[in-house]
Image (cartoon, rainbow, N blue to C red):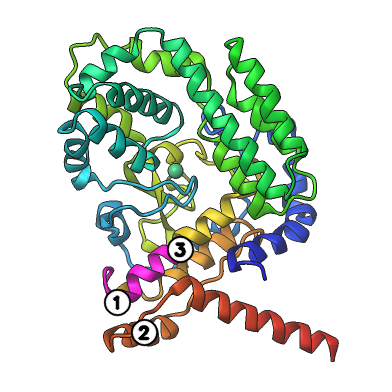
């Protein structure tokens, strides 16, 4: 049985993604931007979106008019980013989260960084893990002191971190393939040799992974890619984090900088610069690091670069639906999942469709919750859509 998010993605891979005429129209050199490379993705404001919005129909978009600051989902803790899937920190909570790291020392600090490593993004994650290693060696070190210690033989520490990531990737790939002898493991082991020589570059590595993915199911490939995303962009990118600062920075200032990528922002699905309205039906919760690279790029391009995006959005929406059902987001958001799905479908010219619960179902589940029953939105979604799939197959067979 496939999980719900995945079968949705497979549909788009097998049909829309390869056959969509809009996408073929955009088939330019720019489309061959390496996947997972958020930093190097070009913004292409000239690539006007050929979606329904262009006819001035955005005014018909549903949802509740609100500023991004009023967007209730932004007020929740630990929401997974709709793009990278890593946990986000809401603006008001940031000082407390920073404090929760900067007040610790030694192994308590190291444990905290490891437990919450999802808050750090790529280069910052590498830096944080190196700081954790230093803190583990000396119970008296706080963030600032561990940060200074990390500067000694920094290149060696970065190489060590990358080797650990690749060793882990070797294991994740073996699980994905069900055998140790597989092309992605071989690539990881070869990359460890490159790392030893100081050659660290995530993008060429993920490009090679992309070429090897072959028949590997997307949800398994996604796990390998997620592991690869722990690699920093390069040696220099991590060094810069340590050398830019003069060493006199407080623990709080250092942690604050390392966490900025995790700030929860509201992404306009239809770009604001192209007339996208300030309405809940046009917002997705996205981390600060992921929010900028898409710019005005069309979804045809974006999905080419980020094939895992539909899985991440599905996970994001199921998380949000759970919060609506649990009463942590007001009932006026009951139609948000349907609204945002409609927007995404239109914006992507049908290349992407989520599996969402309608407002009636959400109300029903909320009542069950109020009556003291446990409700798991992901399981409910899977049941509903599996059943629909079965019925569809039966109809086709008949
Ligand atoms: Zn993100």
Q: Residues at badges 1 and 2 in contact (C-beta under 8 Å)?
A: yes
How busy is the neighbourhood of tag 1: few (under 14 within 10 Å), some, or many (20 plus)?
A: some
Q: Residue at x 61, y 67 (%)?
A: 3
- Above or below, 192 against 37 in this view is above
Q: Which of label 3 and label 1 is nearer to you?
A: 3
Q: Position of residue 269 (x, y in %)?
A: 48, 53
- Above or below, 233 against 3 in this view is above
The residue carrying mark 1 is 331
Depth order, front residue of 233/92: 233
Q: Quadrant of ligand 1?
A: top left
Q: Where is residue 337, by image quadrant?
A: bottom left
- Marks 3/1: CA distance? 15 Å
The residue carrying mark 2 is 363
- Main SS, magenta region, reads helix
Q: Secondary structure at mark 3?
A: helix
Q: Which span is picked out in magenta?
A: 317-330
């Amino acid at each position: 049985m496939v999980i719900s998010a995945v079968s949705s993605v497979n549909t788009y891979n097998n049909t829309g993604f390869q056959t969509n005429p809009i996408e073929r129209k955009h088939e330019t050199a720019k489309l061959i931007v390496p996947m997972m490379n958020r930093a190097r993705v070009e913004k292409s404001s000239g690539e006007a979106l050929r979606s329904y919005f262009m006819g001035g129909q955005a005014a018909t978009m549903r949802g509740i008019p609100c500023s991004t600051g009023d967007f209730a989902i932004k007020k929740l803790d630990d929401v997974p980013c709709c793009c990278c899937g890593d946990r986000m920190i809401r603006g008001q909570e940031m000082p407390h989260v920073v404090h929760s790291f900067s007040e610790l020392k030694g192994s308590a600090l190291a444990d905290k960084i490891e437990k919450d490593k999802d808050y750090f993004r790529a280069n910052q994650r590498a830096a944080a893990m190196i700081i954790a290693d230093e803190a583990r060696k000396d119970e008296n070190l706080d963030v600032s002191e561990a940060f200074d210690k990390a500067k000694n033989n920094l290149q060696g520490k970065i190489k060590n971190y990358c080797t650990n990531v690749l060793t882990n990737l070797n294991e994740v790939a073996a699980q994905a393939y069900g055998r140790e002898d597989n092309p992605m493991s071989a690539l990881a082991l070869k990359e460890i040799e490159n790392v030893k020589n100081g050659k660290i570059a995530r993008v060429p590595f993920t490009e090679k992974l992309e070429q090897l993915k072959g028949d590997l199911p997307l949800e398994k490939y996604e796990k390998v890619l997620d592991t690869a995303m722990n690699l920093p962009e390069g040696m220099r990118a991590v060094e810069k984090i340590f050398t830019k600062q003069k060493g006199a920075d407080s623990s709080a200032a250092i942690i604050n900088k390392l966490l900025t990528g995790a700030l929860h922002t509201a992404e306009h699905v239809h770009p604001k610069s192209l007339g996208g309205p300030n309405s809940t039906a046009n917002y997705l919760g996205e981390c600060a690091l992921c929010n900028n690279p898409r710019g005005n790029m069309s979804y045809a391009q974006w999905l080419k670069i980020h094939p895992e995006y539909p899985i991440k959005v599905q996970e994001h929406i199921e998380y949000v639906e759970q919060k609506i059902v649990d009463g942590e987001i007001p009932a006026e958001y009951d139609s948000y999942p349907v609204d945002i799905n409609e927007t995404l479908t239109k914006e992507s010219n049908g290349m992407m469709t989520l599996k969402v619960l309608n407002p009636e179902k959400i109300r029903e589940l909320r009542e069950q919750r109020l009556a003291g029953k446990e409700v798991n939105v992901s399981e409910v979604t899977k049941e509903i859509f599996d059943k629909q799939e079965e019925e569809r197959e039966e109809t086709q067979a008949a």
